Amino acid sequence: MMGKKLKAAFYAVLFAASTAAFAQDKALVNTSKSPYAKLESVNMGDVQWTNGFWAERFKACRDSMIPNMWRIYADPKMGHAVQNFEIAAGLDTGSHVGPPFQDGDFYKLFEAVASLYAQTHDKKLDELMDKTIAIIGKAQRADGYIHTPAEIEERMHPGVKASFQDRLNFETYNLGHLMTAACIHYRATGKRTFLDIAVKATDYLYRFYKTASPELARNAICPSHYMGVVEMYRTTRDPKYLELAKNLIDIRGLMKEGTDDNQDRIPFREQTVATGHAVRANYLYAGAADVFAETGDTSLTHVLNLVWNDVTQHKLYITGGCGALYDGVSPDGTSYLLKDVQQVHQAYGRDYQLPNFTAHNETCAAVGNVLWNWRMLQLTGDAKYADIMELTLYNGMLSGISLNGTKFLYTNPLAVSDDLPFAQRWSKDRVGYIGYSNCCPPNVIRTIAEVSNYAYNVSDKGLWVNLYGGNNLSTTLKDGSKIKLTQQTDYPWNGAVSITLQEVPANTFSFFVRIPGWCKNASLTVNGKPASVILTPGTYAELNRKWHAGDKIELQLAMPVTMVEANPLVEEVRNQIAVKRGPVVYCIESAGIPKGKKVSGLALSSNIDLKPQNIKIDNADLVSLTGKATIIDNTKWTNQLYREVNSKPLGTVDVQLIPYFAWGNRGHVEMETWIPFSR
Ligand SMILES: [Zn+2]
């Protein structure tokens, strides 16, 4: 038997050796040792945005989004999130303020700070994180449990047991975000302070699931902890955590009281379609993909493939938004038994049920869609997942935050009308603080802080280019060789992308250049000569050769304005069109049409000439599309449901379409994404 000290030294050497062998251990999602992932990420900080779209969004994230949201969470009159930890730690007195998921949302913001630090090495961020970790550490119970609402409740009422009493509480959601944030903090700073807290918390969760009643073990609410636990396994290699992650999936659907809303009415492996709460669903799918990356359990990918097909063929908005319904039932129409019909909320609807005014499309569901598709891309290297990820990033995710980074949408409707005679639960105007349900703002902020991590991948064969944007990349390939390059582009406004190699490995390797699914006409050259490779939309074009410093790869993606129609079974958009250019979906809002006209009184003809034009809204550089829309009669509808068609031509009017994500940044507006089609 080895002595304790010797054993520790042995493992330290083993750990050092294993980390040296894998170059990408500081990745946002670290699949470098995942046996069933085809791709792995580059380290955080390896990609630096230089100019263009994501550089501008990143700057807004650094200078406005993160400082503003931190102020809100540290303000005792608003977020009260830092105060909740201080009170739980015994450093202050008072009650818990905010929803039960406030800790988790604060961890998301912390994660954004850690990701930002990985890219900027700003000492002030490091100090802020150190200070905050000290408070969180004091708030953690000796047994590893940490969830401020229950801890404060137990502190105020000694003898009362508040922890893990309600399966619908958000403890595991909070713990999941703690784990993810701690892994990213560890990878960004090399400090174990936050990771040690997360280890204690994960150990607590491991023990809890060993002893919990089956009913309490079914904590399925917004399961961010599936991703969190797997990432903890990837950081620590503690096999307990992988066992826990597998168990979390296995226990789903074993109890009679499960719901479609929580995706646990039936066991996960029996599911074939996306149901219920869209954030919970997408987090679950992302977590299951993570478990597959480590275990190779094909019964998980079997479900994920079926559900992905269901979402993309029946339930996904053109913006990448997920979750059509505010409230609904599941299933309806398929059972004679009323007891089979369950209430769902913020949920995926029926096939082709994609309303516009009442679309729920929570911003967090779009973030979940990015997380899920990113993981599917890591497993497979299949560009169809990069397409959905890109679509969601540019449209349904980015619409959740204002251009200046300080105002937010909880839901992302595809149309807004002031004439609708009912109010909906969530504001159609952007607000500074969503209050009780502020889950989306820190989620969208961490995503923007982290987009650089999605731009490239490496695999055994070489380097993968997933996203386009002005950046410098300095990373290592799987064999440990260095590669440095510069990407220059004005994407998504312009389809020209130029990649110049500065430092390249001596050995032959492949560049995998993504040809987006939307692009019908692409060209690719190396040093000015056409590449001898077939460019198929929705695939990666592989360029395999011996590369030299100074080599230039140039990609031209034709980006014409495109009119899109939906499957006629989407009854809400029959005879309407949406306008896309590249990956960007456009919309029409009242600030972009002449005063006195309404967006609902306009139609677009099939031969409309829409011209791209550079514009600024709230200091953000955008490309609008301008042209002439046909006026349709939408007046005098008060108290009238039907009337005879007025076929008299009413003329045309100048309109400006803007990217959907930028809507609502010019004050209160009406807006439409699907626009009536005049032939
Ligand atoms: Zn949310």
Image (spheres, rainbow, N blue to C red):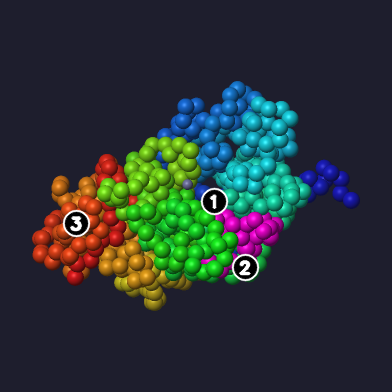
Q: Amino acid at mark 2?
A: Glu
Q: Position of residue 242 (x, y in %)?
A: 69, 56
Q: On the image, which quarter does residue 563 sit in?
A: bottom left
Q: Does any atom of ligand 1 lie closer than 8 Å to the CB of label 3?
A: no
Q: Main secondary structure of the magenta part?
A: loop
Q: CA distance from mark 3 to mark 1?
A: 50 Å
Q: Amino acid at mark 3?
A: Asn
Q: Nearer the viewer, residue 660 or 526?
A: 660
Q: Nearer the viewer, residue 283 or 296?
A: 283
Q: Which mark is residue 28?
A: 1
Q: Earlier in the sequence, mark 3 or mark 1?
A: 1
Residue 272: in magenta span: yes
Q: Which residues are magenta?
A: 247-275
Q: Position of residue 434 (x, y in %)?
A: 43, 39
Residue 238: in magenta span: no
Q: Are marks 3 and 2 in contact (CB under 8 Å)?
A: no
Q: CA distance from mark 1 to mark 2?
A: 31 Å
Q: Residue at x 47, y 50 (%)?
A: 364
Q: Residue at x 51, y 55 (%)?
A: 344
Q: Which residue in the structure is indicated by mark 3?
A: 634
Q: Residue at x 23, y 61 (%)?
A: 642
Q: Earlier in the sequence, mark 1 or mark 2?
A: 1
Q: Which mark is residue 270?
A: 2
